[in-house]
Amino acid sequence: MTKIAMTTPLVEMDGDEMTRIIWQLIKERLICPHVDLKTEYYDLGLAHRDETDDAVTVESAEATKRLGVAVKCATITPNAARVDEYHLKEMWKSPNGTIRAMLDGTVFRAPILVKGIQPVVRNWEAPITIARHAYGDIYKNVEIQVPGAGKVELVYTGADGTEIRELVHEYDGPGVAQGVHNLDTSISSFARSCFKYALDTKQDLWFSAKDTISKKYDHRFKDIFAEIFEAEFADAFAEAGIEYFYTLIDDAVARVMKARGGFIWACKNYDGDVMSDMISSAFGSLAMMTSVLVSPSGVYEYEAAHGTVQRHYYKHLAGEETSTNSVATIFAWSGALRKRGELDNLPDLQAFADRLEKATIATIEAGEMTGDLARITTLENPKVLSTEAFIDAIASRL
Ligand code: NAP
Ligand code: MG
């Protein structure tokens, strides 16, 4: 059998723990037998990030800018426990944070729907895609632990020396304060990515924030979205028969619970972090949530929304059998291969991505699944497969 050819390599960002094991299996059993896989490999596993003083993360993001499409494995964001566990030189920053900041993109997260896994919210019939702004706010904050009485001020000093000064608070005793920021350029590219993605996928776009309380900060987001929509997208939306609207985040939450799905919900950075976990768990499982970072320059980075599944990895290390769900990681690969096929005009590669997804969904719908899904499926007598056996079941269908 001749393998499907690729022209431009994918940027491959390897990662940590259980997902690193899944990563290898997906390549070996699902992709390489069919595709003459070309990748530029970056090892973002924690040990190698530490060896390179995290330079490998920056290099992988640079490569993504150059080549256009990346696929990323979940990675450990170190905390104090990880510093000890891996004897780290320092508590390296979140690789996702570094990559997002460099690509200045928007993260779109959508659940993968299969028959037999019913959303907790009964009226959800179609996926709800969360568009998460990937720059700034509390992810780039500056914080002070206020030691005692005194005042905290916010000071802007212009290039010409002009000053704007606002009192944050007069403290009588200890407390906390933080400064957060965002940029018109980043908010604008967030808005444009959302409008474009809505048009691409022909779905309504909702945007929510809290401009009634945050009258300058959140209001700026609302205004930028409105201006860009009117100037650049209103006609195309009308033509496509889709809608854009802004609403307060608490109103959005209430509406989402009553909606049938099939729309994009654009959220600020923190809201998107929180809401995407809510949406994914309510749709079934964190392991069934895909994620793609789309930069305004048209660069794509695909990944699973979940982490490295640490608890399963320790079981694996102890020699116990695991049943870790690889669906979101498989869809990260299929998404990246399909996009590469689109950009390089390789219809065979795109068709392979479709087949890989179909085989994955068909496997679950036939009742063969991992433990996380077996616990919540409405299918009778599901067959619980191990991490490896599930991938093999997909491979045989493929
Ligand atoms: P996690 O890896 O998302 O797993 C949390 C729990 O969710 C698991 O223990 C498991 O529940 C369930 N789960 C998640 N993915 C699953 C899958 N594919 N199949 C089956 N069950 C799954 O989060 P974590 O264990 O809290 O974090 C581990 C590491 O991941 C951390 O070091 C964190 O920094 C990192 N992280 C990375 C990313 C990223 O790279 N994008 C995102 C989030 C977290 P049960 O144990 O009950 O089976
Ligand atoms: Mg999160």
Image (spheres, helix red, strand yellow):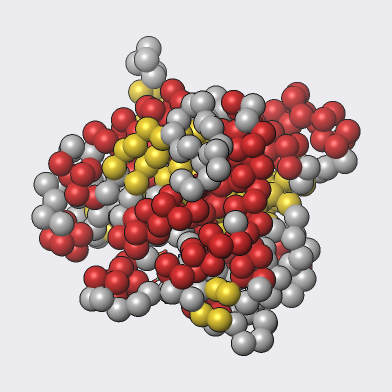
- Relative placement, left or right, of 232 versus 136 is right
Q: How many marks?
A: 0
Occupied quadrant, residue 158: top left
Q: Residue furthest front?
A: 1
- Relative placement, left or right, of 252 versus 144 is right
Occupied quadrant, residue 193: top right
- Relative placement, left or right, of 326 versus 353 is left
In the image, residue 203 above or below residue 187? below
Tell me where residue 149 appears, x and y as whole percent: 23, 54
Tell me where residue 282 appears, x and y as whole percent: 61, 70
Q: Residue at x 50, y 33 (%)?
A: 69
In the image, residue 100 above or below residue 376? above
Q: Residue furthest top?
A: 160
Is any part of residue 151 visible from this angle?
no
Q: Residue at x 54, y 32 (%)?
A: 5
Is any part of residue 60 visible from this angle?
yes
In the image, residue 240 above or below residue 122? above
Q: Residue at x 67, y 71 (%)?
A: 365
Image quadrant where one finds the N terminus? top right
- Judge by depth and name the residue closer to the eye, 44 or 142: 44
Image quadrant where one finds the C terminus? bottom right
Tell me where residue 349 appears, x and y as whole percent: 60, 38
Tell me where residue 11 appears, x and y as whole percent: 42, 35
Q: Residue at x 43, y 69 (%)?
A: 387
- The picture quadrant for ligand 1 comes to bottom left
